[in-house]
Amino acid sequence: MQTRTYGDLFKLIQSLAGVGSFSTDEQSDVANFINRRFFEAFQTSPSWIRYIVVGEERTVGTSPAQTIPFTEASKNNIGEFIRIHRKQPFLNNSAVEYDFYVDASGAHILNQSATTEGTAFVTYKKVFSAFSTSSAYTTSTEEVPAEFFHYIAHASYADFLRMDGQTSKAITEEQIAGNYLALELEKVDIQMNNSTVNKRFRTYVNNQAR
C-alpha cells in the first residue's frame, strides 16, 4: 500500500504554517499533534485495509477456557476482534462463525467445544503504533499511511493554530482535514460493501456450535 514519509508530512505542516522551520518547542508540539491525529484517524474505522488481518489461525487457550488472547508468539498483537470462525473463512464453503465477548484476557468464544477445537480463525484489527520520530523531523523517512497523510497534516496544523490562539483559522483547517478523512472513509465503505469481511449473515449453518 502507498506511503509517504514523516519528513514530507512535517514539511507540509510547516508550509501550511508559512514558516521555514518551527522552534524546538513548536517541533515537539507538532509531533504530539501528529501522533494524536494519527490515532484519531486510525480509530475512525475498524476496516482500514492496511490494519485488517483476515482469518488468521490462533490458539484457543484453556485458562481462561475458550479464550483467544490478544498476543501470541510470532504473530501481530490483536487490537480489536472483528470476527471469529471455526475454519478458514471466505474460501469455497461456509464456515461456522462464533459469537464471543471481549475482556482484558482476550476474546471468549461462546459454545465452542473446548475438547475438540484447539484453534480458531480470527479476523482482527492490528494494534495502533504511534510514529517514533522524535528528532530530525523534516528528514525522517518513517512511513506515513498515504490515506491519512493530508488529514494528519491539516488537522495537526489546526491544532497548531488553536494553540496559537487563531481559533477561526483552526476551524477552517479542521473542516479541510475532515473532508480529506471523509473521502478516505468513503473508499473504505465502498470496499467493504463489495466484500464480506465485515458482513455477518446469520443462517442455521453458521449459528451452529460444532
Image: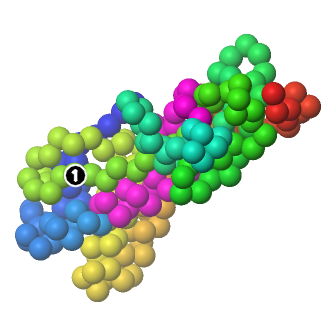
- Identify which residue is drawn at 82% across, 33% down: 209
Magenta highlight on residue 37: yes
Q: Could you say which is closer to the camera, residue 120 or residue 191?
A: 120
Position above or below: 120 against 34: above
Magenta highlight on residue 32: no
Look at label 1 and name its amino acid. Answer: Ser
The x, y position of residue 107, in whole percent, is: 61, 47
How many callouts does the rendering have?
A: 1
Disc 1 is placed on an element classified as loop
Q: Is residue 31 visible?
A: yes
Position above or below: 109 against 13: above
The x, y position of residue 171, in whole percent, is: 42, 76
The x, y position of residue 168, in whole percent, is: 39, 82
- Identify which residue is drawn at 73% across, 13% down: 92
Q: Quadrant of residue 76?
A: top left
The residue lying furthest to the bottom in this view is 165
- Identify which residue is drawn at 36% across, 75% down: 170
Q: Which residues are magenta?
A: 34-60
Colouring scheme applied when the structure was drawn? rainbow
Residue that carries the numbered disc 1 in the rendered image: 132
Disc 1 crowd, CA 10 A, few/some/many (<14, 14-19, 20+): few
Q: Quadrant of the C terminus?
A: top right
- Identify which residue is drawn at 59% across, 35% down: 60
The x, y position of residue 49, in whole percent, is: 51, 36
Q: Quadrant of the N terminus?
A: top left
In the shown orientation, is residue 29 left or right of residue 97? left
Q: Is residue 190 visible?
A: no
Q: Quadrant of residue 123?
A: top right
In the shown orientation, is residue 34 left or right of residue 135? right
Position above or below: 107 against 114: below
Q: Could you say which is closer to the camera, residue 95 or residue 31?
A: 95
